[in-house]
Image (cartoon, rainbow, N blue to C red):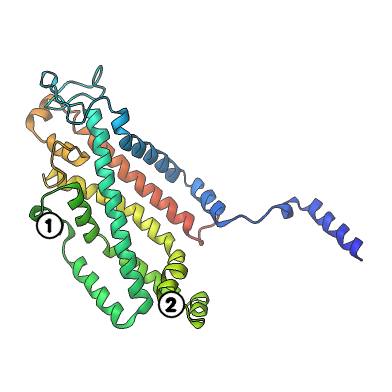
Amino acid sequence: MAQLNVNTSQNELELNPNLKEKPDTLTKIFFRKFRKNKLAVFGAIVLLIIIAASYLSPIIAPYAYDHIDLMKKLKAPGGEYLLGTDRYGRDILTRLLYGGRVSLTVALASVLGAIIIGTTVGAVAGYFGGLIDAVLMRLVDVIISIPSFFLLITVVTIFKPSVTNLVLVFALTTWTGTARLVRGEFLSLRSREFVLASKSIGTRAYKIIFSHILPNAMGPIIVAATLLVGQVILTEAALSYLGLGVNPPTPTWGNMLQDAQSLTIMIQAPWYPIFPGVLILVTVLCFNFVGDGLRDALDPKVND
C-alpha cells in the first residue's frame, strides 16, 4: 500500500509540475502586482533618479549652490552652464540639485512626522473607542475645519522660515487625514479573532495595538504617505513662491520659482522657471503614480 501511495504521488507530480512549486509569499505577490502597473514602475524609477541626484548634489553638482559670477548673469542653457544661469550668475543645474535635496527633505521629514502623529492618534482612538475616541476625533475635526494653507501662512509668518520650522509646521497640520484613516482601520480590525484571542490571554493594549493590529493596517498608511509627500511638495513650493518658505540663498524648487517672478527674467530668461516647475510637476506625479501602484498591490481584492 505504501508503495502504491508513493507511485501515485510521483504520477501526480509528473502530470502537474506546479505541485512542486512552493506557494508564493506575500512579498512576491506584492511585487508581481506592483510590476504590472507600468506607471507605478515608471514613477518609482524616476523618483529614485531624482532622489539620488538630489542627495548626491554635493558630489555631482558642478558648482556650490551659492557660487556667484556677476559677469555671467542670465546665460542661456548650453556650454559651461548646461541649464543656464540666474540673475546672480548662479548655475541653475546646481541649484536645482541642491533645491531638490531641501524640498524632498522637507516633504519626507514632514510626512514621517505626520504619519507618526496621525497613526498614534488614530490607533488610540480606534482601539479604545468611547470617550477617548470622541475627544480625539473632535480635536481632528477642529483642526480640519481650519483652512490648512492659511494656518500654514500664519504659523510660518510668526516663526522664522527654515527647514526645521517648515517640517514641524507641515507635520503638525497634515496628520489629521492619517488619523481618520488609521482609526477606520482599527475599528474594523479590533473585533477580529486574532485581537480577541490576544485580549483573552491578557496581552497588554499597547502590544495589541503596535504588534498585532498596526501591521495589518500598514497598507493604507503607506499609500497615504506617498500621496501626502506630493501634497507637501506642492504646498512648500507655494509657500516659497509667496516668499514664506526657506530663505535664500538656500535653494528650493519653490523659491527658485519665486526668484523667477521678476519681469527681467521673464523677458531675458524665460527658460529659468521652466526647470523647477517641471521638476515639481514630475516629482508630484511620480509620487502619485507610486501611491496608486502601492494601493493596488496591497489591496487583496485586486486580482493578481
Residue 23 locus on image (x, y percent): 65, 56
Residue drawn where x is 45% and y is 64% of the image = 215
Q: Is residue 20 left or right of residue 8?
A: left
Q: Which quadrant of the structure image shows residue 135? A: bottom left
Q: Is residue 95 above or below residue 291?
A: above
List the residue tagged with mark 1: 155
Residue neighbourhood size for the residue with mark 2, other residues' Cα within 10 Å, grouped as few (<14), some (14–19), many (≥20): few
Q: Which amino acid does label 2 sit on?
A: Arg
Instruction: Tell me whether circle 2 and circle 1 mark residues in contact (CB < 8 Å).
Output: no
Depth check: give the residue in front, 176 or 202: 202
Q: Is residue 153 left or right of residue 104?
A: left
Residue drawn where x is 46% and y is 65% of the image = 216
Depth check: give the residue in front, 82 or 102: 102
Determine if residue 258 is in view.
yes
Q: What residue type is labelled 1?
A: Val
Q: Distance between the residues labelled 2 and 1?
A: 39 Å
Disc on res. 166: none
Q: In this view, does 151 lie above or below 124?
A: above
Residue drawn where x is 34% and y is 37% of the image = 50
List the residue tagged with mark 2: 204
Residue 61 locus on image (x, y percent): 28, 28
For mark 2, give the secondary structure: loop
Q: Is residue 111 above or below residue 206?
A: above
Determine if residue 180 is in view.
no
Q: In which quarter of the image is the C terminus?
A: bottom right
Mark positioned earlier in the residue sequence (2 or 1): 1
Q: Which quadrant of the structure image shows residue 134? A: bottom left
Residue neighbourhood size for the residue with mark 1, other residues' Cα within 10 Å, grouped as few (<14), some (14–19), many (≥20): some
Residue 38 locus on image (x, y percent): 46, 43
